[in-house]
């Protein structure tokens, strides 16, 4: 039986998160699916809605986006307009219904959509088993990297935030740390199958954005014209003459891309190699737009 | 544990026991207009307004909805919502009608925020409401019609 | 006077000779093709639209009865297995659990045995069902069953099944003339192979039933397209009189072919309800629905065509390998090859391969749609080889004679459909699309033809009752699954009665009145039911005028009724209908009508042409359908508003078949990986092309009294073929398999 708690402050939430089987509940749009498909079975849900983690505020030359800010707010907020990659990514993610509910923190910490991982009939390597069914089965939507797990990271926001230079503020009862956005992610290993670098009892409290880039954009390909996870997406930003690029859908985690050699380290698998051309094309188009 | 849910302007005492808002609305409050079709956020048949914003009631924990204003299709019958419903009927923006309550909820919310939406804005706001019968061309027309009449 | 007639009925291309009861007094004359009708042919919003829009429509899943138990199905988690152990008593011991059935349970239902299988042949096959006070308790009961399965070898690859000759039935060889010789002699030949995907119906309301017994009488709500078939099936299964089974199905949240008869859900709910002595509600969850609700079978087809240089098709040789799953009736995949164009030398080979998936079942134009998708692409390849306009090639091979039976079609406006579609699509200028486009995309336009049955026939009945307030109720056997057929019945009755629409209401969705109507499938409802409605209404009108003649002491022949008023020809009398009906008191004027047989010597078919325009982003492998023009000959149109909705719905399902929908089965385990709504991609509003619709709308004079043919299936049939042809026009390439997902498009363009 799962219990529900709605702490009134971040500290109270952090306290609760130390309990066995506790899980963060933000919008719950991903967590609900994890629970229904038997991927997670938290004993305690710690709802963030009253912890004051929502909202977008000026922060030096940049912005601070609370972890519990909804994707809809990110898409629409005028303060975020100079970060076009971020607002576009938020606007194109999921559906309006999900964007109204889903949050920034949840978007970054969501689990992969690999159909074996999500399917009730399999217990795959990433889920704690010993077989990656995708590699011996159907992996047309999977990633381009070598590894024990070849799942693709689905977050639209992560690459967009990354190219805008975002950092993630992570808090535990004993204190706070701030890390570059991509450092929130890790590739799963045999002894730790998690995709994020959060320790037990840690919470993402905010994403901080430095001064906006000179220009940024987000290009996305899905399975249909709307309401589809990204198959491959590319975020790119220009600071002066420096270009930064990141992508979703090509690795276990959001991945930085070398604009000069976008396919480096991304050989692909038999059925997923088609994504290479899409990635290359998106990067090329992004760079053409940013340079002009 | 008993909690109070505010649905369509009325306060109801319910025992969520870990269920989603959709189950409580349908099974406890017998508000049967809101539908279950996928149970995983993929179709929008379960759309309700929470503080004026449409969300998927199949994903939202009932306990997480405590303290918020919930409006279901049953609570949408006046003003803009009524215009939307009339336009849906006039344009035949419904076939089997199973997705329709969710469509009406999303369309009403769209017009509240964007009284004169473009085609693109309609697509962005409505893509989370699937219609297997394929009433989309007429849903788009109905929204434009309701926008014109409101 | 009633009499029996021997007549042929047709359902999705299967013909059957049956006795049908017709009423000799059903002598209503057909509406002339140019008859001046006041309501028929005008757009009318659905009579139940407001209820649907306000969320007041009650579907089977919404039925709430006191004391209802909730049933949950335990499904096989493997593609093929044998139950080693299943703890039924353990489940029964769970608090709140009231009834449990498994493969070996003694059941009172006698047909469909076994209802549950100890050796499930596909992932999702029902193994046991638990009914409990709450859904949660039922789930706990399912867990307590502690299913242990021995995993057996499975086969899901159709090629492998073909190699091993694993068939659900004998392969068929349907031939006329000698295709082989004709091919060898042909001046031009082309060959095309294509794989088409398994497509899931995915009605948003899943299969569902709520059963309740009162002694030996069963009342059951079923989400079905065929309530009478469900009634008969349940009566047979439980040894009941048909009149002791009442099936209710007022609102159905989509069916698309998947909901025929009672189905597993109704049988299981009725059985559990009988055991527990309480109402039982069984509703599939989405995963169960996508695994076990049904599917259009995947196919691999090859078409070889021969022609002379002038474009006359001289040989057609087609074969289809069909992934049947566990069985089911053989979808008529090669009907387009056999019937669409004039050709004397034809061969059609069909191989129904048995695989470890659920038995395939009907999905909107089953067989014919996927067959058209391959055959009409081959026709375009032939046009290319002949350097001929694809529409011109089709015109040149047009026929007004059914190529299988040799009988003429009752009506055929296909040539007019070509002309109109070409005009609406701007076909003449389609070459310009291939010039460099300002947005850098490739563009192309393609067409495809459609053939389907859709003539309907007996038995079909209706009764009309006019009350003292001048309002009429039309009782029908219709289950309006979203097609708007009840509204069509309302319109036809109002037209015939001369009453305003608002004073006429059509009822259906209940077997209790025992007014029979056909299953909502095969494009049968409109052509079968509307003549019966018209005939019933005509009798009521006749009686009404007779009574008016008595009241006003005037010859009946001098009276007419329209728009709710009774008038004499000389203008002396002009009164509200209620002037007469008010005198009825509590009596009513009743009339019943039946559908007469289709005239012999003809074959009834619907026809059409669609033209699609697509854009292709070659570097991203992205295909967008920009516009679909759909022109279909379905006889007279009763309600253009709902008719265009039907076309839009069919086109969209065809667009998705071409671009996104595909059941993906894991080769290693034989289990579908995308049997959910998040991964199985049906279209959204943003995937909707502009859809331009027209109908010749010319009544079929050889069909009884209303001249209407069916429209459910036709619009889905040519869409995917037209899109694939447009893709080929744009890119010069064809994909070897559908749907045209990015990976396949990039491969085709590589
Ligand atoms: C049908 C469907 C389609 C979708 N499409 C897209 C899409 O196109 N693009 C996309 O990017 N996403 C998509 N999503 C994923 C969607 O769930 C996320 O976009 C959403 O932002 C998640 O936010 P949430 O607040 O609901 O997360 P939750 O479900 O509340 O949480 C997700 C996970 O993150 C953890 N978590 C949440 N917040 C924090 C925090 N502050 N600190 C630490 N851990 C935390 C939770 O414990 C949980 O494990 C889709 C989801 C569905 C169901
Ligand atoms: S790709 Fe990863 S998540 Fe998918 S089956 Fe393999 S291990 Fe599991
Ligand atoms: S039922 Fe909630 S989104 Fe489908
Ligand atoms: S009207 Fe049937 S699903 Fe939309």
Image (cartoon, coloured by chain):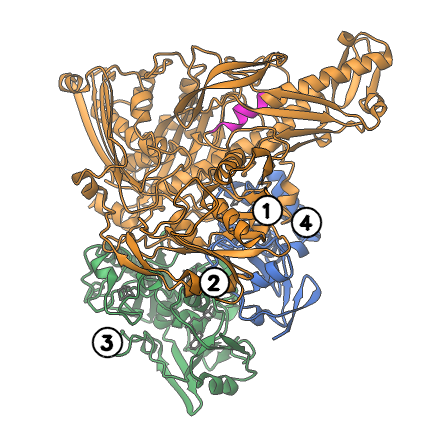
Chain colours: A green, B blue, C orange
Residue at mark 1: C213
Q: CA distance from mark 1 to mark 2?
A: 21 Å
| Residue contact at pointers 2 and 4, CB within 8 angstroms | no
Q: Are marks 2 and 4 on the same chain?
A: no
Q: Which residues are magenta?
A: C523-531
Q: Nearer the viewer, residue C4 or A88?
A: C4
Residue at mark 4: B82
The picture places residue A228, in percent across and down from the top left corner, at 40, 56
| Residue contact at pointers 4 and 1, CB within 8 angstroms | no
Q: Is residue C666 above or below residue C593?
A: below
Residue at mark 3: A190
Q: CA distance from mark 2 to mark 4?
A: 49 Å
| Residue contact at pointers 4 and 3, CB within 8 angstroms | no
Residue at mark 2: C92
The magenta stretch spans residue C676: no
Q: Nearer the viewer, residue C495 or A185?
A: C495
Give left or right: position of A80 versus C395: right
Give left or right: position of C514 versus C631: right
Q: Are marks 4 and 1 on the same chain?
A: no
């Amino acid at each position: 039986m799962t219990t529900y708690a709605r702490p009134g402050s971040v500290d109270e939430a952090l306290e609760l998160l130390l309990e066995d089987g506790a899980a963060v509940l933000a919008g719950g749009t991903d967590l609900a699916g994890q629970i229904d498909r038997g991927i997670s079975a938290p004993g305690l849900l710690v709802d963030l809605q009253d912890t004051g983690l929502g909202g977008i505020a000026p922060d030096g030359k940049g912005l601070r986006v609370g972890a519990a800010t909804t994707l809809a707010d990110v898409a629409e907020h005028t303060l975020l307009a100079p970060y076009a990659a971020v607002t576009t990514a938020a606007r194109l993610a999921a559906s309006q219904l999900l964007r109204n509910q889903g949050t920034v923190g949840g978007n970054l910490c969501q689990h992969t959509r690999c159909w074996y991982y999500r399917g009730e009939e399999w217990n795959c390597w990433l889920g704690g088993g010993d077989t990656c069914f995708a590699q011996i089965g159907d992996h047309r939507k999977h990633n381009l990297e070598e590894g024990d797990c070849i799942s693709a990271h689905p977050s639209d926001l992560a690459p967009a935030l990354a190219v805008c230079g975002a950092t993630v503020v992570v808090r535990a009862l004993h204190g706070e740390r701030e890390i570059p956005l991509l450092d929130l992610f890790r590739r799963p290993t045999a002894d730790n199958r998690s995709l994020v670098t959060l320790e037990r009892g840690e919470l993402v409290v905010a994403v901080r954005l430095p001064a906006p880039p000179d220009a940024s954009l987000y290009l996305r390909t899905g399975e249909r014209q709307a309401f589809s996870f990204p198959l491959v997406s590319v975020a790119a930003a220009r600071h002066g003459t420096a270009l930064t690029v990141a992508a979703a859908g090509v690795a276990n985690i959001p991945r930085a891309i070398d604009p000069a050699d976008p396919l480096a380290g991304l050989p692909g698998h038999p059925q997923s190699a088609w994504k290479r051309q899409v990635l290359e094309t998106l990067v090329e188009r992004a760079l053409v737009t940013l340079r002009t | 544990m008993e909690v109070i849910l505010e649905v369509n302007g009325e306060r109801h005492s319910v025992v969520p026991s870990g269920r989603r808002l959709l189950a409580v609305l349908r099974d406890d409050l017998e508000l049967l207009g809101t539908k279950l079709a996928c149970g995983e956020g993929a179709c929008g048949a379960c759309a309700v307004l929470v503080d004026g914003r449409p969300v998927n009631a199949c994903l939202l924990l009932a306990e997480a909805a405590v303290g918020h204003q919930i409006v279901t299709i049953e609570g949408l019958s006046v003003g803009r919502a009524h215009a939307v419903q009339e336009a849906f009927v006039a344009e035949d923006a419904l076939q089997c009608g199973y997705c329709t309550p969710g469509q009406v909820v999303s369309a009403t919310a769209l017009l509240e925020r964007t009284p004169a939406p473009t085609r693109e804005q309609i697509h962005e706001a409505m893509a989370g409401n699937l219609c297997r019968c394929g009433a989309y061309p007429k849903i788009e027309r109905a929204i434009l019609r309701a926008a014109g009449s409101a | 006077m009633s009499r029996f007639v021997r007549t042929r009925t047709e359902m999705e291309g299967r013909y059957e000779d049956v006795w049908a009861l017709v009423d000799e007094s059903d002598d209503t004359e057909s509406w002339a093709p140019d008859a001046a009708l006041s309501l028929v042919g005008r757009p009318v919003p659905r009579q139940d639209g407001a209820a649907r829009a306000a969320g007041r429509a009650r579907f089977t899943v919404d039925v709430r009865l006191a004391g209802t138990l909730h049933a949950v199905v335990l499904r096989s988690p493997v593609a093929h297995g044998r139950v080693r152990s299943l703890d039924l008593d353990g489940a029964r011991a769970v608090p709140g659990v009231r009834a449990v059935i498994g493969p070996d349970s003694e059941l009172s239902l006698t047909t469909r045995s076994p209802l549950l299988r100890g050796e499930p042949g596909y992932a999702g096959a029902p193994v046991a069902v638990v009914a409990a006070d709450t859904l949660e308790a039922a789930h706990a009961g399912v867990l307590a069953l502690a299913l242990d399965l021995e995993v057996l070898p499975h086969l899901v690859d159709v090629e492998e099944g073909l190699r091993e000759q694993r068939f659900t039935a004998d392969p068929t060889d349907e031939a006329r003339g000698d295709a082989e010789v004709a091919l060898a002699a042909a001046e031009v030949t082309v060959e095309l192979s294509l794989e088409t995907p398994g497509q899931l119906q995915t009605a948003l309301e899943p299969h569902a039933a709520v059963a309740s017994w009162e002694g030996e009488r069963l009342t059951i709500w079923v989400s079905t397209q065929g309530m009478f078939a469900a009634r008969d099936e349940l009566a047979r299964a439980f040894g009941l009189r048909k009149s002791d089974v009442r099936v209710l199905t007022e609102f159905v949240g989509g069916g698309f072919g998947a909901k025929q008869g009672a189905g597993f859900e109704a049988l299981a709910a009725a059985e559990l309800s009988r055991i527990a002595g309480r109402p039982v509600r069984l509703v599939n969850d989405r995963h169960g629905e996508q695994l076990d609700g049904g599917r259009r079978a995947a196919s691999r087809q090859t078409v070889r065509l021969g022609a002379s240089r002038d474009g006359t098709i001289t040989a057609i040789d087609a074969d289809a390998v069909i992934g049947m799953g566990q069985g089911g009736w053989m979808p008529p995949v090669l009907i387009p090859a056999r019937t669409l164009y004039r050709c004397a030398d034809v061969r059609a080979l069909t191989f129904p391969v048995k695989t470890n998936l659920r038995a395939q079942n009907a999905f909107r134009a089953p067989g014919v749609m996927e067959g058209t998708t391959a055959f009409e692409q081959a026709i375009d390849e032939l046009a290319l080889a002949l350097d001929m306009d694809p529409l011109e090639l089709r015109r040149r091979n047009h026929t007004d004679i059914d190529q299988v039976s040799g009988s003429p079609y009752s009506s055929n406006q296909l040539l007019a459909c070509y002309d109109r579609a070409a005009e609406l699509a701007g076909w003449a200028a389609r070459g310009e699309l291939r010039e460099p486009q300002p947005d850098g995309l490739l563009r192309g336009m393609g067409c495809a033809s459609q053939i389907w049955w859709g003539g309907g026939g007996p038995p079909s009945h209706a009764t009309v009752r006019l009350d003292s307030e001048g309002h009429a109720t039309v009782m029908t056997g219709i289950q309006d699954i979203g097609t708007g057929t009840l509204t069509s019945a309302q319109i036809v009755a109002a037209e015939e009665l001369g009453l305003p629409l608002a004073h006429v209401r059509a009822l259906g969705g209940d077997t209790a009145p025992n007014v029979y109507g056909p299953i909502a499938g095969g494009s049968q409802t409109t052509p079968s039911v509307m003549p019966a409605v018209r005939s019933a209404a005509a009798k009521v009108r006749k009686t009404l005028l007779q009574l008016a003649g008595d009241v006003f002491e005037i010859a009946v022949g001098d009276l007419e009724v329209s728009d709710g008023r009774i008038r004499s020809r000389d203008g002396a009398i002009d009164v509200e209908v209620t002037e007469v009906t008010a005198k009825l008191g509590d009596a009513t004027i009743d009339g019943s009508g039946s559908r007469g047989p289709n005239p012999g010597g003809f074959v009834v078919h619907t026809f059409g042409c669609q033209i699609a325009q697509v854009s292709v982003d070659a570097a991203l492998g992205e295909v967008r359908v920009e516009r679909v023009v759909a022109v279909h000959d379905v006889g007279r149109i009763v309600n253009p508003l709902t008719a265009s909705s039907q076309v839009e719905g069919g086109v969209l399902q065809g667009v998705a078949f071409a671009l996104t929908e595909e059941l993906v089965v894991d080769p290693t385990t034989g289990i579908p990986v995308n049997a959910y709504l998040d991964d199985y991609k049906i279209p959204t509003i943003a995937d909707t092309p502009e859809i331009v619709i027209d109908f010749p709308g010319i009544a079929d004079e050889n069909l009884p009294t209303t001249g209407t043919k069916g429209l459910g299936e036709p619009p889905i049939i040519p869409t995917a073929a037209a899109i694939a042809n447009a893709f080929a026009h744009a890119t010069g390439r064809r994909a070897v398999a559908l749907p045209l997902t990015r990976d396949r498009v990039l491969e085709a363009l590589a």
